[in-house]
Structures are given as C-alpha cells and as structure tokens.
Image (spheres, grey):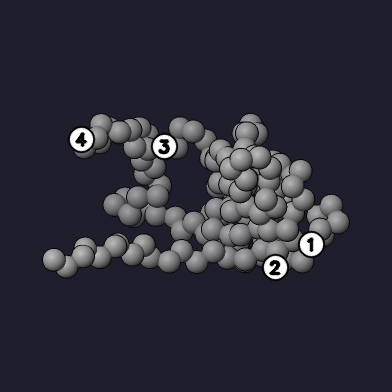
C-alpha cells in the first residue's frame, strides 16, 4: 500500500475499478466506477465517518490499519493546515457498509491512541442548497 503526502486522498481500492470517460462539456476527464452507479443496480452505500483526537504524527496507513479490523476502508482524508501542512488531528474515512461503520464506531470511540482518546462519529451529508438567484 502506498502512503501519500499531506492533502492527498488515499484510495484503498484498486485503481482499475474506475474507468476514465471524457465529458463533452469542458473536456474534463471524469472517473466512472460502475459499482457505484445506480444505473447498473450495483450501488454500494458508502458511509463517511469522522475520526478525531489522534496525535498529529499519525499517518494515513496507521489509521487505516486501526479501522480495518472492523470495516473495509475505501478512502481516507487527514485534514491538514494549509500553511504549515501539519495534521490537525482529525480525518474523514469512507467505509464500505453501514454495519462496518457501526462496528468501528463502537470499538474505537473513546479508545486511547498514543495517549489521546479518539472520537468517532458518523458524518451526515446535508443536501447541497443551490444559491437563490436575486430578484430584479
């Protein structure tokens, strides 16, 4: 497994799970993963969790190894300071299923990692609100 530098997303899945597709507008490359597409009826429900309170010297690989006995980790993003690039002590992980996320939250919430207690919570994504157009 490869460890990425600060601010990059670590994907635990194989890179060939996604297929590059060209968009007609803006000619951008978009990555399409058929297992996440509702068109094919194979959509998996990913669960995002917040993992906070870990020491700033922790790496992505250590956190994945900490969570992996309870749930299969899809992606991890450690939040870092924009200027100093130091870890702020919290991360967001996407897990493959709801049951695994519940197991990880039950097992890891309050657990001590290098002398610091961990906080694990489920992230509830709020629907994106489009800004209203001002009336003229």
Q: Earlier in the sequence, mark 4 or mark 3?
A: 3
What x and y, as percent, mark residue 53? 73, 58
Q: Residue at x 74, y 54 (%)?
A: 54
The kind of secondary structure element at disc 1 is strand
Q: Nearer the viewer, residue 113 or 104?
A: 113
Disc 3/disc 1 C-alpha distance (Å):
36 Å
What x and y, as percent, mark residue 56? 74, 47
Please say if 27 is above or below 51: above
Bin the neighbour count of mark 1 within 10 Å (Cα to Cα): few under 14, some 14-19, many 20 and up.
Answer: some
Q: Single out the mark in the foreground, 4 or 3.
A: 4
Q: Single out the mark in the foreground, 3 or 1.
A: 1
Residue 106: which disc?
2
Q: Residue at x 62, y 34 (%)?
A: 4
* Residue that numbered label 3 is attached to: 18
Disc 2/disc 3 C-alpha distance (Å):
32 Å
Q: Residue at x 79, y 62 (%)?
A: 117
Residue 54 as seen in the image, left or right of residue 4: right
């Amino acid at each position: 497994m490869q460890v990425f530098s600060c601010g990059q997303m670590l994907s635990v899945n194989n890179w060939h799970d996604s297929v590059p597709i060209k968009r007609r507008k803006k000619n951008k490359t978009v990555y399409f993963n058929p297992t996440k597409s509702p068109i094919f009826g194979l959509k998996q429900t990913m669960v995002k969790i917040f993992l906070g309170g870990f020491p700033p010297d922790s790496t992505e690989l250590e956190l994945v190894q900490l969570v992996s006995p309870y749930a299969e980790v899809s992606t991890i993003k450690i939040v870092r300071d924009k200027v100093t690039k130091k870890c702020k002590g919290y991360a967001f992980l996407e897990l493959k299923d709801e049951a695994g996320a519940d197991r990880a939250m039950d097992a890891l919430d309050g657990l001590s990692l290098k002398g610091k207690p961990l906080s694990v919570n489920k992230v509830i994504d709020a629907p994106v609100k489009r800004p209203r157009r001002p009336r003229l």
